[in-house]
Image: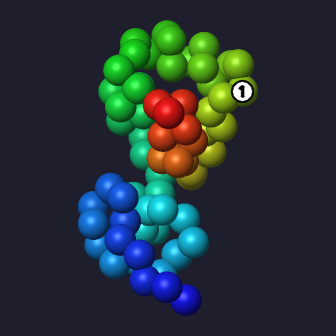
Amino acid sequence: MTIKKCLNCGKSTERIQPYCSECEYMTQKDAYKRLKCSRSTYLRIVASGKLHPRRIGVSKLLVLRAEVDTILG
């Protein structure tokens, strides 16, 4: 397997994904800040099916960083 650099933090990773396991997910707040949109616009993007937040634990929703990057282009 080829060792790659994480696109977010630069650490070496052997994963197929472009991010290391620590950077693979981001919080919803980080996602809408990265998208440079309001929280309500972010929620509309989620409702349209372009982003798929995953529930971790009882109250935490995380988004794949790769999905946010695809929206950014």
The part of the image, by quadrant, that contains residue 30 is top left
Residue 2 lies, in percent from the top left, at 49, 85
The part of the image, by quadrant, that contains residue 23 is bottom left
- Residue appearing at x 42%, y 68% in the figure: 20
Element assignment for label 1:
loop
For the question of whether residue 64 can be seen, the reply is: yes
Residue 31 lies, in percent from the top left, at 42, 33
- Residue appearing at x 61%, y 38% in the figure: 53
Residue at numbered disc 1: 49
- Residue appearing at x 51%, y 19% in the figure: 42
Q: What's the amino acid at mark 1?
A: Gly
Residue 41 lies, in percent from the top left, at 50, 12
Given residues 54 and 24, the one toward you in this image is 24
Residue 29 shown left or right of residue 16 in the figure: left
> Across the whole image, how many numbered discs are drawn on residues?
1
Name the image quarter holding the N terminus.
Answer: bottom right
